[in-house]
Image (cartoon, rainbow, N blue to C red):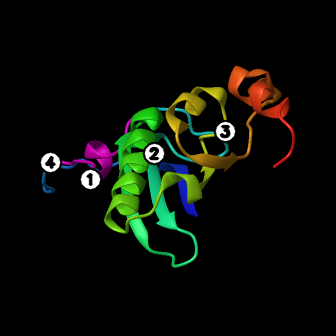
């Protein structure tokens, strides 16, 4: 079982003092943050981060981040690639793998990326139930 968790972090941008006797002001977070959707978090700029871990051993397989709202589909593809490399290294099949998706991966757009993996996710909205892959699975008998 693997956990993929996409999070969004907000950063505060406080006023910087500017006087003649101080060096030029700069913000350390300009390289990793950009304007974006903050949700309920306080801050002026945001960054995204996707972490991958193995659930039973808490082993970290990777962490990917982007500025602003990020590229969460690209981060998910990188996460699934890391899981695939782990399975190949340990000679495990993807049929015996379960991926838990959390955070920003609760919409129908990510279902196309999950081909080949069994997964559990928490939906952001009920439109996820209308997705053709979900409907096809709901019409099958229980396992």
- Residue labelled with disc 3: 106
What is the total number of numbered labels drawn onto the structure image?
4
Q: Nearer the viewer, mark 4 or mark 3?
A: 3
Query: Where, quadrant-wise, is the N terminus in this rendering?
Result: bottom right
Residue named by callout 1: 28
The numbered dot on residue 24 is 4
Q: CA distance from mark 3 to mark 1?
A: 32 Å
- Dividing the picture into quadrants, the one containing residue 34 is top left
Q: Position of residue 143 (x, y in %)?
A: 81, 49
* 89 falls in the magenta region: no
Seen in the image, is 10 located left or right of residue 108? left
Tell me, yes or no, whether the two marked residues, 4 and 3, touch with CB atoms within 8 Å: no
Say which residue label 2 marks. 48
Is disc 3 in contact with disc 2, using a CB cutoff of under 8 Å?
Answer: no
Q: Earlier in the sequence, mark 1 or mark 2?
A: 1
The residue drawn where x is 62% and y is 48% is: 118
Alpha carbon separation for disc pair 2 and 4: 28 Å
Q: CA distance from mark 3 to mark 2?
A: 15 Å
- Secondary structure mostly taken by the magenta-highlighted segment of the chain: loop
- Dot 3 crowding, Cα within 10 Å, few <14, some 14–19, many 20+: some
What residue is rendered at 66% in x and 32% in y? 107
The disc placed on residue 121 is: none
Q: Residue at x 46, y 57 (%)?
A: 51
Magenta span: 25-35
């Amino acid at each position: 079982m693997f956990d993929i968790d996409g999070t969004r972090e907000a950063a505060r941008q406080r006023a910087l003092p500017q006087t003649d006797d101080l060096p030029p002001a700069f913000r350390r977070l300009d390289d990793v943050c950009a304007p974006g959707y903050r949700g309920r978090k306080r801050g002026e700029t945001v960054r995204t981060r996707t972490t991958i871990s193995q659930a039973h051993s808490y082993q970290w397989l990777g962490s990917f981040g982007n500025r602003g709202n990020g590229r969460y589909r690209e981060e998910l593809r990188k996460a699934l690639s890391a899981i695939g490399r782990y399975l190949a290294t340990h000679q495990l099949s993807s049929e015996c793998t379960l991926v838990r998706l959390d955070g920003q991966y609760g919409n129908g757009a990510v279902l196309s990326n999950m081909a080949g993996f069994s997964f559990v996710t928490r939906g952001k909205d009920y439109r996820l139930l209308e997705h053709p892959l979900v409907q096809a699975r709901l019409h099958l008998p229980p396992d």
